[in-house]
Image (cartoon, rainbow, N blue to C red):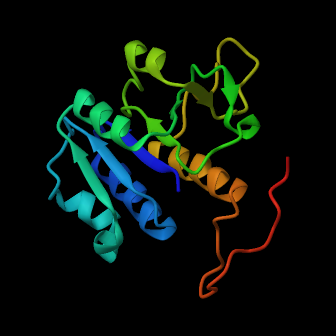
Amino acid sequence: MPRIVLYQPQIPPNTGNVARTCAATDTELHLVEPLGFQIDDRQLKRAGLDYWPLVSLVRHGSWDAFLNHRSSRGGRLIALSSHGSASYCDWLFSPEDWLLFGRESDGLPAAILSGADATLAISMARAARAAQPGVRSLNLSVAVGVVLFEALRQQDLLTLPGSPTSTGITPAR
């Protein structure tokens, strides 16, 4: 099962929404500190609703601590960034992937991007006029949902609510 990694998230409701998505998909959520909020923040808890007990949450005190944890478990580090060189739609995800998302204000630092096994982007429509360059990025929780559900779809790991088995839909490729 792919894992979600948030690098130094800053906005509590975004992280709460990501946690809720992770609870719904049985996906581990890794938070790399420092966080821009307290883990008991009211907005964080509210966004995650009463699903927090279903979240497999791992906190890492630093980027180096996360890297040590990841090296003990294996898997590819897949960074998501507006600077990505390939679309997440064209990527073949693996069950052991670590899907890495950056801070809401400035994304992932160049040093972290250069250490990733791949850097993917989410394609978006952009305005053609120079006066309106278009949207730079999606909301963090939306970006996580888009990419995570594609990774799970490819691996046939999605189920319908109340169904004990997968959808049986063969991933397109």
Residue 121 appears left or right of 20: right
Q: In the image, is residue 11 above or below residue 129?
A: below
Of 10 and 33, which appears nearest the observer? 33
Residue 154 appears left or right of 83: right
Residue drawn at x 49%, y 39% is 75
Of 166 and 18, which appears nearest the observer? 166
Residue 74 appears left or right of 13: right
Q: Tell me which corner region of the image, top left, top right, bottom left or bottom right, holds residue 86.
A: top right
Q: Position of residue 140 (x, y in %)?
A: 46, 42
Q: In the image, is residue 169 above or below residue 143?
A: below
Residue drawn at x 64%, y 19% is 133
Residue drawn at x 18%, y 61% is 42
Count of numbered marks: 0
Q: Position of residue 134 (x, y in %)?
A: 64, 25
Q: Position of residue 56 (x, y in %)?
A: 33, 62
Q: In the image, is residue 82 above or below residue 172?
A: above
Of 140 and 7, which appears nearest the observer? 7
Of 141 and 154, which appears nearest the observer? 154
Q: Tell me which corner region of the image, top left, top right, bottom left or bottom right, holds residue 74.
A: top left
Residue 132 appears left or right of 82: right
Q: Position of residue 67 (x, y in %)?
A: 32, 31
